[in-house]
Image (cartoon, rainbow, N blue to C red):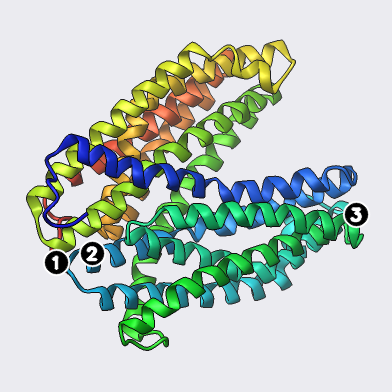
Amino acid sequence: MSSSTPIDSPKNISRQILALAVPALGALIAEPLFLMADSAIVGHLGVNELAGAALGTTVLQTAVGLMIFLAYATTPAVARAIGAGRPAQAMAAGRDGMWFAVVIGVLLSVLGYFGARPLVLLMGSDGVTADFAVDYIHYSLPGLTAMLLVLAATGVLRGMQDTKTPLVVATVGFGLNIVLNFALVYGAHMSVAGAGLGTSIAQWLMAAVYLWMLLPRIREQGISLAPSWAGFISTGQVGSWLMLRNLTMRAALLLTVLVATSSGTQTLAAHQLVFTIFSFLAFALDALAIAAQAMIGQELGRGDAQRVRKLTGIMSRWGIYFGAATGILLLATSWIFPMIFTPDEQIRQLTTVGLWALALSQPLCGLVFVLDGVLIGAGDARYLGLASVVNLVVYLPMLWAVLALAPEPTWAIWWIWVAFALGFMASRGVTLAVRARGTAWMRLGV
């Protein structure tokens, strides 16, 4: 969007949001699809193989999930510089972010290679299953650096308001991953290791495509391909606060699972099904957040506080309206989704109860995701990191109350999701809204 585009035109804003959010949604689900493909292919080998691959993918998902800040740190830096009319600075920020991803990827790969077996044993696995899990991790680790490089490069393109290219690359990469895994698991008889190796190869091919696209743009700006120490440190500082944010949110999810587990097997099973629906809806809301990151970053770079404020209001309403729509749809279908996932009547009933609470929270969730994206786009990482700690502290008494006061499964699943989807999200919403209403986060220019 050029500076002459009328930011106050709702139709224009709507088109721009959709142009960024829809492709972003497709790219967001690529990584889970990679891991789902591994599980589907390995699942036909046997129970031990499938269990081992499940442990291995859990380890990788955790590592990649914590490193998502690589995309969130590069997007606002690139977007702000482009908005300020400084393409060389934008490409330098992207270059430093990608170098940071490479360094982190190499370090994690080395640690993962030597720590794979102790980690798997710590997770409670042993014997043949543990062997398969270690095989999967070892053969996946060569692709971990590529995965993180893809995250950083995706952040660069988002900052340039290009979410279509990551969608294309992710789609082709997913298809190639399936072909490679079939060939290596069954054709080369590599078993679980073949699934890990196939994913590694696919990830490196995706990373190569991004490098092929971005390196010439860096050279065109007359800047070195070597990282800037100042830019490298800046990426690390922003990333550390965003990692703190990710850690506290994952801690909240883990503690919620522990409370569900203590309430019994049926409550845990129902909780997992509700969380599956929550995760799916979160992808759609996160796509709106990505649009907010890119658009807010560029407007701040242009230095127009009035446009930033108006855009924040428009996107906040988008989040609330979209959440309300998905909430109504979820209420209407809350008895259908459980039938898809389980034949057990009691788990179906418990899942439906959990979905009611999730449906009521959707407008709030929509607002939270969008405001989170706005502040990430503004580079307000320190506040987000500190606020996430506050949110976790506020959430802990809610979980204790559920644990102490709701032992019966139906009430347990209801109050677990009231606590998480309404209580925890309300805490996040308050800290985000208070910040967004002020001006401290609106640092104009570069």
Residues under labels 3 and 2: Cα distance?
A: 51 Å
Q: Residue at x 26, y 42 (%)?
A: 431
Q: Residue at x 57, y 72 (%)?
A: 208
For discs 3 and 2, the disc positioned in front in the rendered view? 2
Vertical placement of residue 79 versus 57, above or below: below
Contact between marks 2 and 1 (CB within 8 A): the answer is yes
Q: Secondary structure at mark 2?
A: helix
Q: Nearer the viewer, residue 1 or 309?
A: 1
Q: Amino acid at mark 3?
A: Val
Q: From the image, tell me which residue sits under label 3.
A: 128
Q: Is residue 398 left or right of residue 274?
A: left
Vertical placement of residue 167 versus 93, above or below: above
Tag of residue 445:
1
Residues under labels 2 and 1: Cα distance?
A: 7 Å
Q: Quadrant of the N terminus?
A: bottom left
**Residue 324's spot in the image, x, y percent?**
34, 22
Density class for disc 1 (Cα within 10 Å; few <14, some 14-19, many ≥20) is: some
**Residue 372's spot in the image, x, y percent?**
31, 46
Q: Is residue 405 visible?
A: yes
Q: Earlier in the sequence, mark 2 or mark 1?
A: 2
Q: Residue at x 26, y 48 (%)?
A: 374
Tag of residue 80:
2
Density class for disc 3 (Cα within 10 Å; few <14, some 14-19, many ≥20) is: few
**Residue 282's spot in the image, x, y percent?**
46, 37
Density class for disc 2 (Cα within 10 Å; few <14, some 14-19, many ≥20) is: many
